[in-house]
Amino acid sequence: MNHVRAETSSKSHNIIDQKPPRVSVIIPTYNRKELLTRSLESVLSQTFKPFEIILVDNGSNDNSITDNHISDNGNYGVAISYGFYNELFGNNFVYNRRNADFEVPFSQRKSNTWNENYWSDAYLPRILPKFIFGVGLFLIFYPIPCFNVDWNPATKPYII
């Protein structure tokens, strides 16, 4: 049991079982796909695990997310915001609260390519395509529900 003693003016307080802080790790990238996996592995190998990892990419032309095991996230496995022409393939999405989400301009709503990913939220054998729900923004302010499709989802997880 962790005990922390905090002194404030003349009073002292015992804080028992203080919850660890939630940490967000932000990784900026631009056309550095070959280093991105190494960066993610470095963050995930730390003894203190982050609450979320946010990748910020401003218009790279090498937008591939591939061969990752994305699991046990309290929020999203992958959330794409204003990113388009992304290719996501060969990933495992396992035990995330919500495996994937996207928010893009409405005209670009079909520009992300999802292919051969494993989805743990499939309660039945995966014989149909996997729908990835998101939002297309019309005139920036009006969200319109839309979806992308993983036409060839994997039937079993990859060994990554």
Image: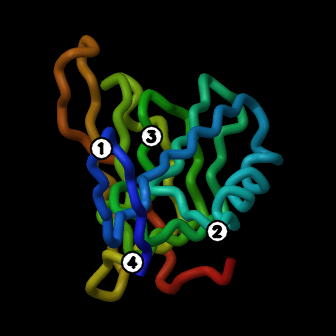
> Given the image, on which type of amino acid does mark 1 rest?
Ser
Circle on res. 80: 3
Q: Is residue 67 above or below residue 54?
A: below
Instruction: State which mark lies toward you, 3 or 1.
Output: 1
**Mark 2 or 1, nearer chain start:** 1
Q: What element does badge 4 sit on? A: loop
Q: What element does badge 2 sit on? A: loop
- Is 149 situated left or right of 160 in this image? left
Viewer-proximal residue, 75 or 63? Answer: 75
Q: Is residue 157 above or below residue 40?
A: below
> Given the image, on which type of amino acid does mark 4 rest?
Ser
Q: Is residue 91 above or below residue 57?
A: below
**Cα gap from disc 2 to disc 3, whole angstroms:** 27 Å
Q: Position of residue 102 (x, y in %)?
A: 37, 41
* Residue at image mark 4: 120
Q: Quadrant of the C terminus?
A: bottom right
Instruction: State which mark lies toward you, 1 or 4.
Output: 1
Q: Is residue 69 above or below residue 148?
A: below
